[in-house]
């Protein structure tokens, strides 16, 4: 997050500005309630600092906690749930593109300040009403018999989902061990559940790395459309996705490389990257799959910091509410040199419609 240093400087310097509840620096406006220093605000109903960054069209809700223990993961989870509705309200009220939640945990003696990690990676909290075509794909653990989200998918029709083939593949794959959860903002909670009848993986998947990593999944039960459950649109066969196109990805995947999944739906804005350049870069890595013309690379070229991650597979790459790609694979997450790779939908549109 590029504004963390600026925010921290303002936070530190404001100790000498007791009579100014609003500060502005570099186009960033900070609303400050100084009572946070002495209060144990884990029970507060409002954020301690609100930062309005008009230049980047976003808002930061900062919550400072002096916890009774140092369990940052638990504190961060509490804050995400606590401020979800407020974040959506602020985004609409101030007409910004995103509102990000920043939990800060200060040790009880005040000696340490821990900034929580960014969460998809470099993302913002959203709700399923903003991405009603997105579903969670759950897998049943054969040993514990517990269900948990591990991929995502996109609603094609009331009884068909578009996802990644590698989410429905493997020596122990069984359709009975997969289901989808539609209409849910939170991971593994809410919405409606529909079980999988059959997965139709594209016949080329597995022949050349992740080429053909796309699947049409037939459900046993039909979904009922609502404001939180809607069908997606896909591009016509052969549509060419241009370079530098602003696209959106969403999901409940890991919040950092090797990190935990998000318990709330997240989205990130990225840009498509030239396929030949992406393929050239990946070709420098030993024992990595090839980037083919049937794929779309996306991220922030040579900067990184924004990407999908583990657990987002099968979810959408969207342009103007059209699902142009299916999140597939990549080298780590949010790598500045090696962008995330999605399956391009348009080479497979006729096949999808024919199932």
Image (cartoon, helix red, strand yellow):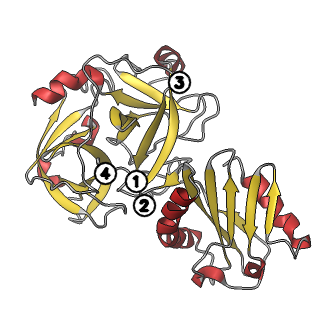
Viewer-side label of 1, 4: 4
Mark closer to the chain start, 2 or 4: 4
Viewer-side residue, 156 vs 261:
156
* Left or right of residue 108: residue 232: left
Measured as percent of width and height from the top left, residue 103 is found at 62, 66
Label 3, on which residue?
Answer: 244
Q: Residues within 10 Å of mark 3 (few under 14, many from 20)?
A: some
Q: Are marks 2 and 1 in contact (CB under 8 Å)?
A: yes
Label 4, on which residue?
Answer: 132
Mark closer to the chain start, 3 or 4: 4
Looking at the image, residue 19 lies above or below residue 236: below
Viewer-side residue, 235 vs 66:
235
Measured as percent of width and height from the top left, residue 189 is found at 31, 67
SS at mark 1 in the image: loop
Label 1, on which residue?
Answer: 252
Q: Residue at x 28, y 30 (%)?
A: 213
Mark closer to the chain start, 2 or 1: 1
CA separation, marks 3 and 4?
A: 26 Å
CA separation, marks 3 and 1?
A: 25 Å
> Residue 9: which quarter of the image?
bottom right
* Left or right of residue 157: residue 315: right
* Left or right of residue 33: residue 274: left
Viewer-side label of 2, 3: 3
């Amino acid at each position: 997050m590029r504004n963390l240093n600026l925010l921290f400087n303002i936070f530190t310097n404001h100790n000498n500005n007791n009579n100014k509840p609003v500060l502005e620096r570099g186009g960033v406006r900070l609303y400050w309630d100084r009572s946070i220093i002495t209060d144990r605000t884990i029970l507060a109903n409002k954020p301690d600092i609100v930062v309005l960054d008009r230049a980047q069209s976003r808002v930061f809700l900062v919550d400072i906690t002096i916890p009774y223990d140092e369990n940052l993961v638990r504190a961060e989870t509490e804050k995400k749930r606590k401020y979800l509705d407020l974040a959506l309200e602020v985004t609409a009220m101030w007409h910004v593109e995103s509102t990000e939640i920043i939990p800060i945990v200060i040790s009880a003696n005040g000696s340490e300040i821990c900034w929580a990690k960014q969460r998809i990676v470099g993302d913002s909290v959203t709700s399923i009403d903003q991405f009603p075509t997105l579903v969670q794909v759950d897998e049943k653990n054969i040993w514990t018999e517990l269900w948990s989200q591990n991929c995502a998918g996109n609603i094609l029709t009331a009884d068909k989902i578009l996802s990644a083939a590698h989410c429905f593949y493997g020596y122990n794959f069984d359709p009975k061990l997969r289901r989808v959860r539609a209409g849910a903002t939170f991971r593994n909670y809410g919405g409606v559940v529909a079980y999988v009848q059959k997965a139709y993986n594209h016949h080329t998947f597995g022949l050349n790395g992740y080429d053909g990593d796309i699947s049409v999944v037939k459900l046993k039960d039909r979904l009922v459309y609502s404001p939180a459950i809607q069908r997606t649109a896909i591009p016509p066969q052969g549509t060419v996705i241009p370079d530098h196109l602003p696209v959106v990805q969403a999901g409940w995947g890991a919040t950092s490389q090797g990190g935990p999944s998000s318990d709330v739906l997240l989205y990130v804005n990225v840009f498509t990257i030239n396929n030949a350049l992406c393929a050239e870069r990946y070709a420098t890595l030993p024992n990595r799959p090839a980037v083919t013309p049937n794929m779309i690379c996306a991220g922030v070229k040579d900067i990184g910091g924004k990407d999908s991650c583990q657990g987002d597979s099968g979810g959408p790459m969207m342009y103007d509410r059209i699902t142009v790609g299916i999140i597939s694979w990549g080298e780590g997450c949010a790598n500045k040199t090696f962008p995330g790779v999605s399956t391009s939908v348009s080479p497979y549109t006729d096949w999808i419609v024919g199932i």
